[in-house]
């Protein structure tokens, strides 16, 4: 038996005062992030919002996505979202990583390919995964480090993209160790070669400190 229709007047309908702002912020976040699967992403967004956790939201629109196919894969903006969500843990489980990856609508086969680049078990050291993600985005080692600087920096967009030398050295050494063509001596020489410039900038590495070295080692 169908339920009787219920008539409401304007006075009976009460809209929570915070609802318009919540929906406005959600809409802005969706426009900036351009999720591949809106429903999956929306569920993750409101779940994070309810828990007070970092939201799966890009800082800005990546315009190149407009011409990419639906499952185009990892982008710098999406890797930065993952970093915001997972970096505080230091080490994350593969299960949690898969969940966050899926929330962003990223292809599962790409995650599997990245994980196979190292002998990870059930847990992943986040900064190593970040480095591998940058290598997928960058292609060459130095291009990968440029991606890392732009993702990790606290400088405003278009700035020097500075990161601490210790962080740079860890990521660079890790990626170089995976590349069988780069010896440990070459890695040490490279890092030693940029130290003078780094010391002039209070221990911070700038992109312009290492890109000129591309013609020496690569």
Image (cartoon, rainbow, N blue to C red):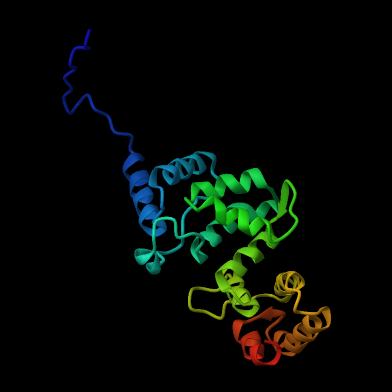
Q: Residue furthest top?
A: 1
Name the residue located 38 percent from the left edge and 53 percent from the top edge.
30
| Residue shown at 40% from the left, 54% from the top | 29
- Whether 12 is drawn above or below 147: the answer is above
Residue 40 occupies quadrant: top left
Residue 6 shows in the view: yes
Front residue (pair 68, 28): 68
Horizontal side of residue 56 vs 144, given as left or right = left
Q: Residue furthest right?
A: 185
Q: Residue at x 33, y 38 (%)?
A: 17
Residue 168 image point, x, y percent: 70, 74
The answer to which quarter of the image holds residue 125 is: bottom right
Residue 140, image x and y in percent? Answer: 62, 77
Labels in figure, total = 0
**Quadrant (top left/top right/bottom left/bottom right) for the C terminus:** bottom right
In the rendered view, tell whether residue 30 sits above or below residue 157: above
Residue 150, visible in the rendered structure: no
Horizontally, is 152 left or right of 165 in the view? left
**Is 134 drawn above or below residue 208 in the view shown?**
above
* Image coords of residue 67 (percent x, y): 35, 66
Quarter of the picture holding the N terminus: top left
Residue in the picture at 60% in, 82% down: 207
């Amino acid at each position: 038996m169908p339920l009787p229709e219920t008539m409401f007047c304007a006075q009976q309908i009460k809209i929570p005062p915070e609802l318009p702002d919540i929906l406005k912020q959600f809409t802005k976040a969706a426009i900036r992030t351009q999720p591949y699967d809106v429903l999956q992403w929306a569920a993750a967004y409101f779940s994070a919002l309810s828990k007070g956790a970092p939201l799966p939201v890009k800082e800005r629109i990546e315009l190149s996505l407009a011409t990419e196919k639906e499952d185009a894969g990892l982008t710098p903006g999406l890797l930065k979202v993952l970093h915001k969500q997972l970096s505080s843990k230091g080490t994350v489980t593969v299960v949690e990583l898969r969940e966050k990856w899926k929330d962003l609508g990223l292809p599962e086969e790409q995650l599997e390919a990245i994980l196979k680049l190292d002998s990870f078990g059930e847990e992943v050291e986040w900064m190593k995964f970040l480095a591998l993600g940058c290598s997928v985005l960058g292609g060459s080692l130095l291009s990968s480090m440029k991606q890392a600087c732009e993702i990790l920096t606290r400088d405003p967009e278009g700035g020097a993209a500075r990161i601490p030398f210790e962080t740079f050295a860890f990521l660079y050494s890790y990626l170089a160790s995976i590349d069988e063509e780069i010896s440990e001596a070459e890695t040490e020489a490279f890092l030693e070669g940029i130290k003078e410039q780094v010391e002039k900038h209070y221990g911070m590495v700038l992109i312009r400190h290492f890109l000129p070295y591309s013609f020496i080692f690569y």
